[in-house]
């Protein structure tokens, strides 16, 4: 533990709540970490090579750092973000680190700063604040550690006490790194998650090439919707064999609506011929949400939906730098009407577990908690993305718990690309949950024994149970 | 008072606020209960028979208990919920109670558990926690009490210090139980509320049979829209004579829009012939919202709107078990545009009191508080249904008060079917309002004298005044 | 400072937070006031005449006082609000004041009461509470002071320590009062803001006469869209010469969508001929949002958008009393889709500063914070109008900070017509920001030095920088 991080940080400053929160947190702090959904690159653990430097470790995989810097006028080129053309990008990682440190004050009050301070202190033993003055000395100290065996990816994984880490993988992915990991003798459990977006989103430029890849990896040509479904079922089976317990879909709207086999195939044929419309894309996606639920009932994979993000909102940045550059902006999202066909067909089936996420907090109390508090299949995912934060977690618990209870939620999900931030994120979540339970205890809504039991469930038990780990 | 319930429960744990809240609550705790809107069965008091057993008392009338159990995989049949076919349902109430107790932990942090703990302790003197082990002994102790005269419905009504209890009754209802009650010599004030949903919702299967019933009770056949309006006016008059002070409409959308007499009759004729469309239903409902406002101006009944619930969202449960099985899910609801025609025609009329409720908390600060803070006719109903809860009440006050003030709100409404939960619900509301006022006092926004005056209004005065009781 | 106002008012009652908040507030309390957007009449300072009486000073310019009174059944005529016909209005300002005082309790818990208590105590040295009994004595004491030189508008401006006060002025306005002020030798900085709503909103009855006025003030007839654009550019230039640093648009929806020059002119011609449609109005406004952004890039004026208010919702009041009578009701507002064309064309340009406001709090965390946390041009305006309040400010900071950070917000904006309320409003904002920062400090999310620095920025620095003052 670090001396620069206050042991009671993030807890309510009321002494009674703070003290109770501390006691609850003591019992959850050291539980193993379950990361049931995220975007860490599995090659990290397959190759187990040193992280090259602090810029590569902290900045490059975290577009939520450079989105803030960009919002304040710093060019992405200056942060080393590669352009599509390859031109004009800063290559000096020490320079980039200095810019980051010069603007670290912009992150005051954000979870990014909370996580980074944790990483510096706990993972690297650096108690000093990151400032313009300290930037390069901190860089050098981190760089030195990164070159030692203790800071290799697998060593960190073990030190972080990660029980399971789930990656996110395309339908046509061969899962080669996962196979390498398992054959390596290393005991770290890194498992894939089946995310078929690239072969479902007809509107994407790469859809046809993805279908071709899917056909190649399945060993047959995909010329009809029924082939396509066969291919997906085959890949899900393969993912299961490689340890997968879940699927995920990142969709614009959580609309589910069944097409007839004929309609589905007609759209599929148009898409193959490059003549499908935007309406086709929406219809097809809605049908595939239904199909994914059916398949989950058949093969037991937990189904996750992450809707409501307008991807690549900034066309200028997309054209120059490509996707995933911090330009995804949420939109209002509707679940009650949209999911009804799915829930009416599959929501009462005990074999289905459907984990719903949202970026639209107005639906927590209006739609999601009521749905999770009724349908046996529905569980509520953690407060997601922008809401994976202190206030975001607090709003989530306050708006969800009274209607859905604790047991229709699924514990914490870090959903990160930034591997070294995983313990920081879980620590924040465990602290905020301890704080929430402490407040309920101090107000005599639950008793302390119950708070301890719930603390365990929120930190560990529910994730393990929901994802069948 | 009970030793298992902490006297300062639900108050903020800050000592200054907690102490002030306690002082305010002392002055409101024993005020009579006004229940201006709810769903308790009036036959309870007409017949005044013993409640058969704890399962019948607590579980059967409260679909918000078995919705949570259902969400965690417990079959409704196992909970004794009658199927339409009558088949396969658990009849052993002790067994059902045991299942309930085994899963009582699911309700941690929910208002259901808060209310039940209050009922066990305060109404039945049971200090022990409900667990698997204590289930049947608690069952037996409650059962024993239920067979004593002190636990007959009227005795409980008197003990609960209920000043007025409003039931909810269909337009064609004869109000027989209400008449029996008044003729019985018992002084309990149980009054009806006029809820014409069954004769307004053209889309309902039973609409034509309800119209027939309405005609029968009025003594004339309803063959035109003008007969229909006459019938409704006649029934409102009858309800008033039986003590009613209010009407209520449970509608999907709070849209108000006047039709011409000719248009209204054309839709009515199509509905009689069974050829009306979904659009007809929406138009007709919107027109009837206007008509109900007009009638309220003429006869003085307070008008209530409860919009925004997608009823019977789960078709599987509806087909097997029927309505009101905890499967109603809220939707986004719009008031600013939808109510404008009504407010422009009637909203400035001092004779109209229109009480608006919502399940969509995003409209509290955006639409409802601004409307209530301007239109003389508009008042804001209490935080409703899923939001009749600790956090729900707190959000309501925080989002509404600064724009609408306290005096455009109407005090607490329990809206329950579960008779023995009424004092628990009012107690929670009084505690949360005391807590809110204590916080304002501690922050020097109001002074303590004002807090006491407002405490009285929120607990008692505003409901009495709004509903003309 | 006043003895009737508690020095630690509005702070969290937790002693640790309260004490920290007090320390932060000490450092911001006396910073000069920057009022970058509001509706104070510049003639106040051009003429510098005594305010006639308390009713004229407090009530007449503040339709948020009489909207609350009206909502509780008090006639606007009785409050001296002039009817269009001029008939039937109370002229006795002492009588009106008495009515106001009789109903002052209605404002309990609202910011109006908080501001007024501050004004009475700090500006007029009146410690007594406003009640029915004290009404006229308070009236007389204020009246007496108003007749002294210390209470002339310019003297108050200086005493209030206002560094800049921005007014809101139509495109065709000659800015005569601003010129008089600057020529007077008085050093108070009162600057105009360019608000072209009256010449953009084709739907308004007065649009054509406003276009004529615009032509007159420009010295050429406006017969085409290109003339119109020329005229606006010329007026913006004139406003800049008169000290303006910003523009503002009060629009129904923040939709931005470019038309071709031909389409724009076709709509413009229809509007001149009085044949434009509602769709034309929407298209034209969306195009003008784009045009205003283009012009801001060219001339450097900061662009502000205030969308989402349904103006004159109450037709009855509008017909009788005209606009701005407290009958504006918010609606749901969408930014992610609507602003995309503007942000894609101009949002990455460092020359543009676009300040976004909202009345729809559900978009804070869903749309506005993500947009401000990414696009270099976007900044988030303060919590606006109904949300310029204690809870409103708190919700704003809690929902915005973690995603957008502090530096993508623009400090406090009072947006008031009520000149003497300006210091009260800034004081409340500085207290609530101090409280928010104190809470972050107590929870060890930021340290105390950072809190002081941020306190300065939120109270003063960010407004000065954003508006280039």
Image (cartoon, coloured by chain):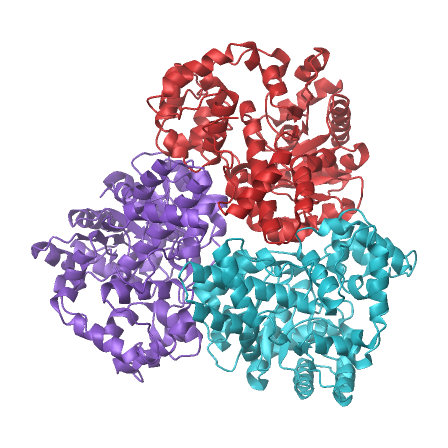
Chain colours: A purple, B red, C cyan
**B59 is higher (above) or lower (below) than C456:** above
Q: Nearer the viewer, residue C16 or C270?
A: C16
Q: Nearer the viewer, residue C328 or A159?
A: A159
Q: Quadrant of the C terminus of chain C?
A: bottom right
Q: Nearer the viewer, residue B353 or B254?
A: B353
Q: Residue furthest front?
A: C3
Q: Is residue B464 left or right of residue C17?
A: right
**A54 is higher (above) or lower (below) than B209:** below
**C366 is higher (above) or lower (below) than A55:** above
> Where, by quadrant of the figure, is residue C61 drawn?
bottom right
Q: Is residue C39 visible?
A: yes
Residue B376 in percent (x, y) is at 76, 46
> Where, by quadrant of the figure, is residue B297 drawn?
top right
Residue C309 in percent (x, y) is at 65, 60
Q: Is residue A312 left or right of residue A144?
A: right
Q: Is residue C358 left or right of residue A331?
A: right
The structure residue drawn at horizontal position 55% and vertical position 67%, both measured from the top left corner, is: C25
Q: Nearer the viewer, residue A344 or C396?
A: C396
The structure residue drawn at horizontal position 51% and vertical position 34%, both measured from the top left corner, is: B7
Q: Quadrant of the N terminus of chain C?
A: bottom right
Q: Is residue B384 visible?
A: no
Q: What is the count of numbered marks?
A: 0
Residue A150 in percent (x, y) is at 14, 65
Residue A332 in percent (x, y) is at 49, 55
């Amino acid at each position: 533990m670090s001396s620069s991080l206050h042991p009671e940080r993030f807890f309510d400053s009321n002494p009674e709540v703070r003290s109770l929160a501390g006691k609850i947190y003591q019992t959850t702090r050291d539980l193993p970490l379950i990361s049931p959904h995220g975007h860490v690159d599995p090659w990290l653990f397959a190759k187990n090579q040193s992280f090259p430097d602090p810029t590569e470790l902290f900045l490059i995989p975290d577009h939520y750092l450079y989105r803030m810097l960009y919002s304040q006028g710093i060019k992405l080129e200056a942060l080393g973000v590669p352009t599509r053309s390859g031109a004009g990008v800063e290559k000096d990682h020490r320079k980039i680190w200095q810019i980051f440190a010069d603007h670290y004050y912009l992150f005051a009050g954000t979870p990014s700063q909370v996580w980074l301070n944790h990483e510096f202190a706990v993972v690297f033993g650096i108690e000093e604040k990151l400032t313009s003055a300290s930037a390069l000395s901190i860089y050098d100290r981190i760089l030195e550690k990164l070159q030692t065996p203790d800071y290799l990816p697998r060593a960190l994984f073990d030190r972080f006490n990660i029980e399971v880490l789930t990656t996110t993988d395309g339908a046509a992915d061969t899962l080669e790194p996962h196979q390498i990991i398992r054959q390596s003798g290393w005991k770290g459990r890194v498992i894939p998650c089946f995310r078929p977006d690239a072969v479902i989103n007809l509107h994407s430029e790469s859809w046809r090439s993805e279908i071709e890849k899917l056909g190649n990896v399945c060993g047959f040509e995909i010329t009809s919707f029924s082939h396509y479904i066969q291919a997906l079922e085959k890949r899900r089976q393969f993912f299961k064999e490689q340890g997968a317990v879940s699927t995920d879909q990142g969709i614009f709207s959580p609309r589910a609506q069944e097409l007839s086999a004929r309609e589905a195939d007609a759209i599929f044929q148009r898409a193959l011929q490059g003549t499908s419309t935007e309406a086709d894309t929406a219809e097809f996606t809605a049908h595939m949400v239904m199909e994914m639920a059916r398949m989950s009932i058949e093969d037991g994979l937990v189904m996750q939906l992450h809707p409501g993000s307008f991807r690549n909102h900034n066309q200028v940045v997309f054209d120059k730098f490509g996707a995933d550059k911090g330009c995804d902006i949420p939109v209002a999202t509707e679940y009650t009407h949209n999911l009804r066909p799915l829930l009416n067909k599959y929501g009462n089936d005990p074999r289905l577990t459907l984990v719903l996420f949202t970026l639209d907090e107005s639906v927590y109390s209006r739609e999601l908690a009521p749905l999770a508090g009724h349908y046996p299949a529905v569980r509520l995912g953690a407060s997601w993305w922008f809401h994976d934060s202190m206030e975001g977690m607090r709003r989530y618990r306050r708006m969800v718990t009274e209607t859905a209870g604790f047991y229709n939620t699924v514990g914490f999900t870090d959903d990160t690309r930034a591997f070294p931030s995983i313990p920081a994120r879980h620590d924040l979540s465990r602290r905020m949950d301890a704080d929430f339970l402490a407040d309920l205890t101090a107000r005599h809504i639950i008793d302390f024994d119950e708070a301890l039991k719930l603390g365990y469930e929120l930190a560990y038990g529910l994730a393990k149970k929901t994802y069948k780990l």
